[in-house]
Each structure stands twice: as structure tokens, then as C-alpha cells.
């Protein structure tokens, strides 16, 4: 950490012009997936507050720069987590983003926003309180930012901080006519990740 200041001094001076219109990038990343507290409403006015534990997230991204500073980007990411009461809770994100990258030097911050779907896998309970594992795919969106450090024209390191908002407020799933559940609020999680970028 004592040499971390070096990156902020030397990389802005290296104006190599690594961004080229019509180029593509591919990234493998890993990091932390920070959980959220949410409420599930079961039958018979039974409400249960659950807290999603922090977990490890893995994924990949592909970007295409159709202009020098603008790119479209696709993200595939997943995490296998659990709640504080011991239930499994997995999340898989499939998102398309618009990315704006500042500057042309080796140190390049960026902002990104996008939409997609999220698949959630978790247990719920029927009217007799028997546990069932189910899978839901819901609309979601994300926004965030970060920076890249380009070491040459083909390789960079990237860090991201982004929030995911999964639209769950109107979801329901019925095992029979009397056995339904629904979310009381949306799920909001945070990704903090680092990755290796290959440019071509």
C-alpha cells in the first residue's frame, strides 16, 4: 500500500492513447457481493425479514467501443450466498450497459449504467410451511463506476463499484390457489470487483 501513490503520479502522465474507436475488451473479474435486508410476505399475513450475507462474486464482461470514449458492455456474473437464518440464496446477473470512459491515458475512470435480468434461487414455504426451492428471473438495473489502468495496448487492470436493483415488489408465486408469497420490497446489492482486461 505504501507505493499506491505511485500509480496516481505516473499513470496520468502516460498518454499513450490506448483507446481506439472500434476496439473491444474482454474482462474476467472477481470481488465482493454485499447483501441487503428485505421482507418476504407469506400466507396468513406472515412476514419474515431476511438479511442476505455478503459473498464472493465471479463474472466476465465484454465491451465494444463504438466511439473513442463510448462503449456498450455485457456482463455475466453470479454469486452463491445465504441468508443469516441459513437459507441458500443465489443471484445471477445478465446485464447490458452503456459505458462512458474519461480520458485517453493509462489511467482511465469510467461511469456505467444499464439494464437486464437477474435470476434468483432460494427457498420458500407452502401453506403447510414445507420448504420449496424455487427460481425467479426478474427485471433489474445497475449503475456505478470505477477505473482502468492500462499497462499497454492489450492489457489493463479494472476495478468496479456498482449497485444492482432487482425489481421484486410485485412478484408472486403460487403453489395452489391459497398458497402464495410476495416480496415487500426490492433487492439492492453492491458489487466491489477487480478484474483483468484484454483489449483487441
Image: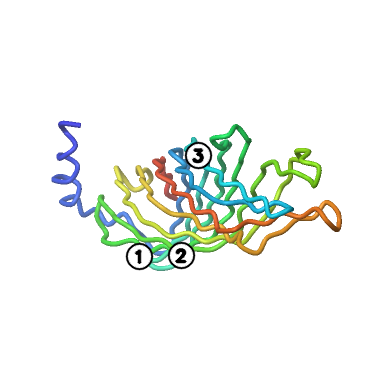
Q: How far across and how far down the image is residue 114, in percent?
A: 49, 63
Helix, strand, or loop for circle 2?
strand
Q: Which residue, as the protein is rendered here, is positioned at the far right? A: 176
Classify residue 115 by image quadrant.
bottom right
Q: Is residue 169 above or below residue 126?
A: below
At horizontal 19% and vertical 42% (from top left) the residue drawn is 7
Q: How far across and how far down the image is residue 188, in percent?
A: 49, 54
User: What quarter of the picture does the N terminus occupy?
Assistant: top left
Marks 2/1: CA–CA distance: 11 Å
Classify residue 86 by image quadrant.
top right
Helix, strand, or loop for circle 3?
strand
Residue under label 3: 57
Residue under label 2: 98
Q: Earlier in the sequence, mark 2 or mark 1?
A: 1
- Tag 2–tag 1 contact (CB < 8 Å): no
> Horizontal placement of 158 versus 93: left or right?
left
At horizontal 40% and vertical 66% (from top left) the residue drawn is 70
Closer-to-camera residue (17/167): 167
Closer-to-camera residue (101/199): 101
Closer-to-camera residue (73/87): 87
> Horizontal placement of 80 versus 177: left or right?
left
Q: Earlier in the sequence, mark 3 or mark 1?
A: 3
Q: Residues within 10 Å of mark 2 (few under 14, many from 20)?
A: some
Q: Residues within 10 Å of mark 3 (few under 14, many from 20)?
A: many
Give me the disc on residue 69. Answer: 1
Marks 3/1: CA–CA distance: 27 Å
Q: Earlier in the sequence, mark 2 or mark 3?
A: 3
Q: Is residue 74 above or below residue 151?
A: below
Q: How far across and how far down the image is residue 148, in percent?
A: 32, 49
At horizontal 64% and vertical 48% (from top left) the residue drawn is 120
Q: Residues within 10 Å of mark 1 (few under 14, many from 20)?
A: some
Amino acid at each position: 500500500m505504501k507505493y499506491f501513490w505511485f500509480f496516481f503520479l505516473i499513470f496520468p502522465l502516460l498518454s499513450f492513447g490506448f483507446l481506439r474507436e472500434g476496439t473491444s475488451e474482454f474482462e474476467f473479474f472477481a470481488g465482493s457481493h454485499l447483501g441487503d435486508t428485505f421482507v418476504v410476505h407469506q400466507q396468513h399475513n406472515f412476514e419474515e425479514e431476511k438479511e442476505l450475507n455478503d459473498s464472493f462474486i465471479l463474472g466476465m464482461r465484454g465491451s465494444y467501443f463504438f466511439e473513442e470514449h463510448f462503449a456498450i458492455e455485457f456482463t455475466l456474473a453470479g454469486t452463491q450466498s445465504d441468508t443469516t437464518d441459513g437459507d441458500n440464496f443465489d443471484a445471477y446477473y445478465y446485464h447490458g450497459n452503456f459505458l462512458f470512459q474519461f480520458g485517453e491515458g493509462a489511467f482511465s475512470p469510467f461511469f456505467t449504467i444499464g439494464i437486464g435480468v437477474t435470476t434468483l434461487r432460494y427457498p420458500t414455504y407452502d401453506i403447510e410451511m414445507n420448504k420449496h426451492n424455487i427460481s425467479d428471473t426478474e427485471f433489474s438495473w445497475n449503475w456505478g463506476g470505477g477505473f482502468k489502468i492500462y499497462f499497454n495496448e492489450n492489457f489493463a487492470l479494472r476495478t468496479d463499484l456498482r449497485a444492482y436493483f432487482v425489481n421484486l415488489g410485485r412478484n408472486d408465486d403460487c403453489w395452489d390457489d391459497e398458497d402464495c408469497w410476495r416480496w415487500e420490497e426490492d433487492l439492492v446489492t453492491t458489487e466491489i470487483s477487480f478484474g483483468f482486461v484484454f483489449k483487441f
